[in-house]
Image (spheres, rainbow, N blue to C red):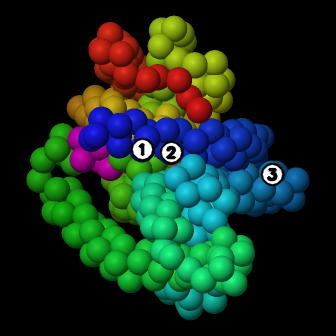
Amino acid sequence: MITDFFKQLRQHLLTGVSYAIPFVACGGILIAAALAFAPSNPESHAPDPSTVPALMFLLKIGVLSFKLMLPILAAYIAYSIAGKPGLVPGAIGGFLCNDLRVLAFFPQPGEKELSAGFLGAIVAGLLAGYLVALIKKVPTHRLIKPVMPILIIPIVSSLIVSATMILLLGPPIVDLMDWLTVHLKEMQTGNAILLAAVIGAMIAFDMGGPVNKVAFFFSAGLIAKGNFLPMGACAVAICTPPLGMGLATLLSRRLWSEEERDSGLAALGMGTIGITEGAIPFAAADPLRVIPCLMAGSMVGAVIAMLARVGNHAPHGGPIVLPVIDNRMMYVVAIIAGTVTTALLINLLKSFSKRKGAPEELA
């Protein structure tokens, strides 16, 4: 019974991922193009497309594609569980995960973003799907039954999912972010190696989500204070998840479906320009195996970078920032070490699962 439940759960996640992959690829490639051709900012030494309208257009469309990824992921997870009535509450719950502030459509000055990332979208999709499936079982009058799937279920379930995401998930995320920021500042004055390991783990944990953002903005904020080492570790950790997953699909092609191998090639492209989200399709489809491997690779790379005193003068990551890196040779070594660690670990786990007969095909 439990085994069947987890098999169905995996199938629901794979369905959501299969619809979300094109949004990840579109967003990653457009953002990569905008950053790759952007002139360097003289102050931050990072790619800055803001002075070129065409590049800003590419960047904004790419960001829009990433923002649409979360509602699509959540909507089709819910659709897999409960059919068409699950689409609306899933999409709304996933959209809220971009920013859980209930008044995000009218942001106040100084109000910080509250993102739940792709992990929040998975929760929203599952919540919407199982809620709608439950509501569908409620006995109703024959006159009301025809409007249930097109009117009553979407409205009721959307309100419940939205309220749950805003009232129950939002406050703990805010508290967690504040707690992580305080402890990162304490680590800065203590064990630098531990700080690098924590930064690496946080960057890879939710790939653009709230935990990732805390580590990134903490590291980027230290650049202005002349401390470039945390951003050096961060820059390595940013690119190793997509690079590691891309390398894994190349090293053992038999372990991956054709769709996953295509995603691997896209992930390699995104990794080279520091788009951590390139690993999300793999993590969303198989979070229990993929996320620990991503975190391990990023931690290895970040620690090597910190030990070698790799500094980064730009608030970005990946090989694209190599011109503004201190100790470039060890920066490359750290990226390779983290990438190989992730690739070998995930292929080892998938080989073990394949021998056990677990399903591996993408929906």
Tell me what residue is drawn at x 58 percent, y 25 percent: 260
**Which residue is disc 1 drawn over?**
9
| Label 3, residues with CA under 10 Å away: few <14, some 14-19, many ≥20 | many
List the residue tagged with mark 3.
58
Tell me the distance, in whole angstroms, between the alpha carbons under discs 1 and 3: 36 Å
Of marks 1 and 3, which one's residue comes earlier in the chain? 1
- Nearer to us of marks 1 and 3 is 1
The mark that comes first in sequence, 3 or 2, is: 2
What span is in magenta?
197-203
Residue 12 is marked as 2
Quarter of the figure with the N terminus: top left
| SS at mark 3 in the image | helix
Q: Amino acid at mark 3?
A: Leu
Q: Residue at x 59, y 63 (%)?
A: 86
Badge 2 element? helix
Q: Residue at x 56, y 57 (%)?
A: 82
